[in-house]
Amino acid sequence: MKEYQTITEISGPLVYAEVDEAIGYDEIVEIETAQGDTLRGQVLESSEGLVAIQVFEGTSGIDQNASVRFLGETMKMPVTEDLLGRVLDGSGRPIDGGPEIVPEERQDIVGAAINPYSREYPEEFIETGVSAIDGMNTLVRGQKLPIFSSSGQPHSELAMQIARQASVPEEEEDGEDGSEFAVIFGAMGITQEEANEFMQDFERTGALERSVVFMNLADDPAVERTVTPRMVLTTAEYLAFEKDYHVLVILTDMTNYCEALREIGAAREEVPGRRGYPGYMYTDLAQLYERAGRIEGREGSVTQIPILTMPGDDDTHPIPDLTGYITEGQIYVDPDLNSQGLQPPINVLPSLSRLMDDGIGEGLTREDHADAKDQMFAAYAEGEDLRDLVNIVGREALSELDNKYLDFADAFESEFVDQGFDQNRTIEETLEIGWDLLSMLPKDALNRVDEEFIEEYYREDDSEREIVEAAD
Amino acid sequence: MSKAESTETTDNGVIQSVSGPVVSARDLNARMNDVVYVGDEGLMGEVIEIEGNITTIQVYEETSGVGPGEPVENTGEPLSVDLGPGMLDAIYDGVQRPLDVLEGKMDSPYLDRGVDAPGIDLDEKWEFEPTVEEGDEVARGDVVGVVEETVTIDHKVMVPPDAVEEDETAEVVAIEAGSFDVTETVAELSNGVEVTMRQEWPVREARPTVEKQTPRQPLVSGQRILDGLFPIAKGGTAAIPGPFGSGKTVTQHQLAKYADADIIVYVGCGERGNEMTEVIEDFPELEDPANGNPLMARTSLIANTSNMPVAARESCIYTGITIAEYYRDMGYDVALMADSTSRWAEAMREISSRLEEMPGEEGYPAYLAARLAQFYERAGYFENINGTEGSVSAIGAVSPPGGDFSEPVTQNTLRIVKTFWALDADLAERRHFPSINWNESYSLYKDQLDPWFQEEVAEDWPDKRQWAVDVLDEETELQEIVQLVGKDALPEDQQLTLEVARYLREAYLQQNAFHPVDTYCPPEKTYLMLTTIETFNDEAFAALEAGVPIEEIIDVESAPKINRIGVQEDYEEYIEDLKAEITKELRSLY
């Protein structure tokens, strides 16, 4: 391995160095500064005689006398089952004071694309215990379902609730205790306080021993954020497809990741795309999100819940926009509902789970699930619309049916959505509450539900509405 | 792609620099668009720029670890596809590598680099049945025989377009029935050409035809809002723009499943892996509504998911349309679905920006409009060079950022296509599917397709459609007033119009893609459903005229049954009874 002291230019997170051998694209570089610090970086562009290096820890302290070493390999993640229970930094080095990690394998962090032919279509229902998700936007194993939130919203609480409660009901019945379930938590640029909340929650619930935590905090180098999710997903793939774990990956906050991409793009003087983000951001994000899934013949699965805070709560911003085009749906956390005190403040109307239809129904959840869900969506949307009108003309001016829709929308929020971050509901409970609510409407209005199900589940009189009463 | 086996290597070069999917090489003697193999691993790439001694290459695979000094090998041929039996029931990546074969070759569920496989199986034997005899004269494009490619489709073996000069013929000197693989000669011509079942064709070049004709037959899709209000012709072009979550992919899938084309080419361009897997798992189990055979027997899939290399995404659209043209040459009606053309445009943008080209609008290259036009122009209803008629219909999904239709890809597409199905996030949010906005969508084929619908379905098809459109238009206007004053403040006749429009929206325009019966609605049913709503309309207005209060009319018990027509398998009887019931009930009110 040669050492060079040939740095010609330092600009933002980038260092340019002259070389006299062939350096591979994406290769890992170590830079030793005059003070004796070792910084790590990656080759961004390799030409004859000159390479551009992005330095993960930032370039401060580097001068033209710093020495550059090329390690001759691309970035690898040391993986082993012993990672469970460990806390690592954003580049995969332990920061919990525990023993050195003895890797079983070292895997390239730029995962290869899964052959669509080898994938297995995800259709196993994951019970998150959150009605707004289970009932209306069901999550399945191998799905990537982001949480679209904005600053100051309780998206972390929601993510923790899902991580804590997520289970697959069928398997529990079979006597498997869900022990092969693992959570990998990738923090990118979140504050120390947020990180502490996650850690405390992990420790309080004992979840840490089945978790791997990667921490890149707000004051850690931004460029490191571009490798953190790849470290996370490489670990996830290893645990899922080689060690048969069902892995739930939580990535927070993707917005910080994209900011880091933009920073590197700007430093390289690339032609910017929308709002200054690089033109390849779609491809880059896809390479992360598409690493969720199931593979035929393998036991495990990778399910992703990326969290992103939409700047200005605007979902047409490039980050949520590109994410929405890649992921299989999205869960909206709504500031209005939050200020009304709903926990979790999920707005089900714009939320969507694309893989829902194949994951619900007879044998999976319950036979009436799809119809009941459709009807609740339609009724809630109707009620939402009417709210605007009520502000103008008042309730008295509306028909009896319209008033029922308004009541439905109110009850839907207070009974169905607002369950608290600590309540864990089974799908059965969720659907029962749903029917309690639907029974507020006249039978004729339930045009999306099969007659058979109306017959079976519709509450003819109030005395049957037990659950709501009990919940009150 | 099978270039490695079939061509000799010409002048080689050396890599000079690597930046993501763009590699530049020194001393490479290549023409524009030549296919090259890059680096020690032999990654496939294509020449996209030549400047002095430096050749710029877009690489179809991940370039991590590739460095300067590694060799570049030129095949001397443009990016081509293998055409021949075996393309149906197959699933390819963006450069026609069969994904099932790759899985076996790589022995891994991941797509490794530098692995190549021919687009069609070179060893499989097909039963060749000649359709000409020795001594017959054949021209270019003429069919010399058939093989049964799948249960649904007879694959016609044609004289390649470049084998015989235009306006000339050649004599068949030898031809024989029997079992051949695609590389063996099945016919010999007097000019020395040996015809095999396999042809190669450069993807960026349209296959020759005699002339483009005006399309006059609809591509019947079994989707009420499409067939009924905004039909597309066989050989037509359509765009489906919509924000994420509005149902582009489901609409494309429905078309792929139920459109009455002979052949479907489905291009998943930069879309989700799980979605492609759904297609791969579902299609073999679904039945072709026309003949009950498996749907895959008429389908060729190209799956270039969003995480596959960006350069292959740029080429997958061309791979798809070239395959489509080949089946068109046999005289088939082919429908090509591209989901999504925005990803294709973005791939162009990404590569253009790596080349540091001067960007046009929103960073897209200045040639975006030209490329889109070229693609859609390859669709059409054609007279083929062998005298048969065939069509390629192109249906492109567009994914505008933020759902804003004023962006360049949507706008440039709209300038070319003649059918526009605008998806609407509001409708999707209230789970009105398909969420096609009836106010914004249009079809310019309506008039030229009306004669077909009049002939095949009902003489008054255009009138009924116009009636529905009028009611929906009126509803849109009335809704604005309702927003201000509430429904009850409207005069009774307008309230009734709203009620009729509601049935149109809920029963007619909505269609449940996941219901086994409702998912496919034949044109007859589409028509009868509309007449049922019209019956309700006529009878209800008559009742209103006779002084029946609007509340009583709206509350009639039979009317909500209109919403259940969609799920009825024996719809004719149901509709007949329902019409009678509605008429009887409404007349009993006065």
Image: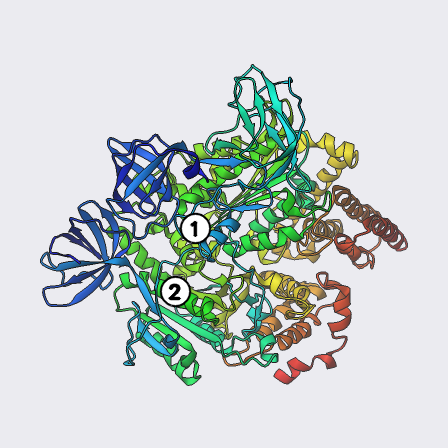
Marks 2/1 in contact by CB < 8 Å: the verdict is no
Q: Quadrant of residue B422?
A: top right
The 10 Å Cα crowd at callout 1, few under 14, some 14 to 19, many 20 or more, is many
Q: Amino acid at mark 2?
A: Thr
Residue B358 can be seen in this image: no
Give the camera-side residue of A143 and A346.
A143
The 10 Å Cα crowd at callout 2, few under 14, some 14 to 19, many 20 or more, is many
Whole-percent x, y for residue B16 in the image: 24, 42
Cα distance, mark 2 to mark 1? 17 Å
According to the image, label 2 marks what residue? A234
In the picture, the quarter occupied by the C terminus of chain A is: bottom right
Whole-percent x, y for residue B44 in the image: 38, 42
Measuring 24% from the left and 30% from the top, which residue is drawn there?
A: B52
* Chain under numbered label 2: A
Q: Is residue B504 above or below residue B369?
A: below
Q: Is residue A427 above or below residue A17?
A: below
Look at the image and name its color scheme. Answer: rainbow
- Mark 1: secondary structure: loop
- Mark 2: secondary structure: helix
Whole-percent x, y for residue B379 in the image: 56, 32
Q: Quadrant of residue B456?
A: top right
Give the camera-side residue of A3 and B247.
A3
* Chain under numbered label 1: B
**A425 sits to left or right of B455:** left
Q: Which mark is residue B308?
A: 1
Q: Quadrant of residue B555?
A: bottom right
